Image: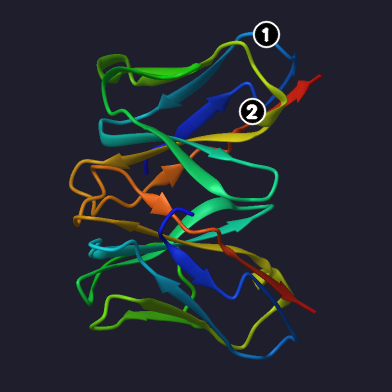
């Protein structure tokens, strides 16, 4: 157990639907990062929060949004889902903003859009 | 943006063999990490190594920042070492967002 908890582990949903992925960071970590892993794009950074504030955006679609709550857990919302959104979504956390002391990844949420 | 290239893309070893995985990056970095993704998809942090050499059991890593490459050594490989090894970097001035290479897929045969 890495200490980063992601739920659900698996999710199957239909095109056009909306889903919410949840992440609880490791205790004491203030930064949360979301990554998407797909067969064609590999592992890509989506978005980062630090202590409740958005700090960086990567290749995140406008249909996707995220937030970090006062208790530091984070949610990634995916809407108007398309077949191409099927992927493994990872959350990672680090103790400080820059991740320079290393990341800890959760076990991921496998999203299948049918 | 920064490019991260890993080689070889695929590697098949017999149990007990040694191997070296390479990661080249195209710009200065302040963060370099090696990860192992096991067959169940879990990403495990192996090393945080923006420069220098570290060892952890049968694994060791060396990063030569001035020449923009890092090496991951696996000695006496075991079947449990199978999976994909990723190198990931973050550039100076970023918020620590990691740019991942495409990985090296390692298969260790008994």
Asked if marks 2 and 1 touch (Cβ < 8 Å), the reply is no
Q: Secondary structure at mark 1?
A: loop
Mark number displayed over residue A26: none
Image coords of residue A37 (percent x, y): 59, 56
How far across and down, in percent of the image, does residue A91 sit?
45, 63
Q: Quadrant of the N terminus of chain B?
A: top left
Q: Residue at x 68, y 50 (%)?
A: B40
How far from the left and from the top, in percent, is residue B69?
39, 19
Please give the chain letter of the residue carrying mark 2. B
Which of the marked residues, 2 or 1, is nearer the chain's N terminus?
1
From what the image shows, is residue A14 above or below residue B27?
Answer: below
- Residue at horizontal 50 percent and vertical 69 percent from the top: A6
Instruction: List the residue tagged with mark 2.
Output: B81
| Quadrant of the rendering where the C terminus of chain B is positioned | top right
Above or below, A10 against B72 in this view is: below
Q: CA distance from mark 2 to mark 1?
A: 11 Å
Q: Which mark is residue B17?
A: 1
Instruction: Tell me what residue is drawn at x 65 percent, y 83 percent.
Output: A81
**Residue A4 in which image quadrant:** bottom left
Above or below residue A70? Residue A110 is above
**Looking at this view, is B20 or A9 the one in front?**
A9
From the viewer's perspective, tell me whether residue A47 is left or right of residue B85.
Answer: left
The colour scheme used to paint the residues is rainbow
């Amino acid at each position: 157990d890495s200490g980063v908890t992601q739920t659900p582990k698996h999710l199957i949903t239909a095109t056009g639907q909306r889903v919410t992925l949840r992440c609880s960071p490791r205790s004491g970590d203030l930064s949360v990062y979301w990554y998407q892993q797909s067969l064609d794009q590999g592992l890509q950074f989506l978005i980062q929060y630090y202590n409740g504030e958005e700090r960086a955006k990567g290749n995140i679609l406008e249909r996707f949004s995220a937030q970090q709550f006062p208790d530091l857990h984070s949610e990634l919302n995916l809407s108007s889902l398309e077949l191409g959104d099927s992927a493994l979504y990872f959350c990672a956390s680090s103790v400080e903003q820059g991740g320079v002391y290393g990341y800890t990844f959760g076990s991921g949420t496998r999203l299948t859009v049918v | 943006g920064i490019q991260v290239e890993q080689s070889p893309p695929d590697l098949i070893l017999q149990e007990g063999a040694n191997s070296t995985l390479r990661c080249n990056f195209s710009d200065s970095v302040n963060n370099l990490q090696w990860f192992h993704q096991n067959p169940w998809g879990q990403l495990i942090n192996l090393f945080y190594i923006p420069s220098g050499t570290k060892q952890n059991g049968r694994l060791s890593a060396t990063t030569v920042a001035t020449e923009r490459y890092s090496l991951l050594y696996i000695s006496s490989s075991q079947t449990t070492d199978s999976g994909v090894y990723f190198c990931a970097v973050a550039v100076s001035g970023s918020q620590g967002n990691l740019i991942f290479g495409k990985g090296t897929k390692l298969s260790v045969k008994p």
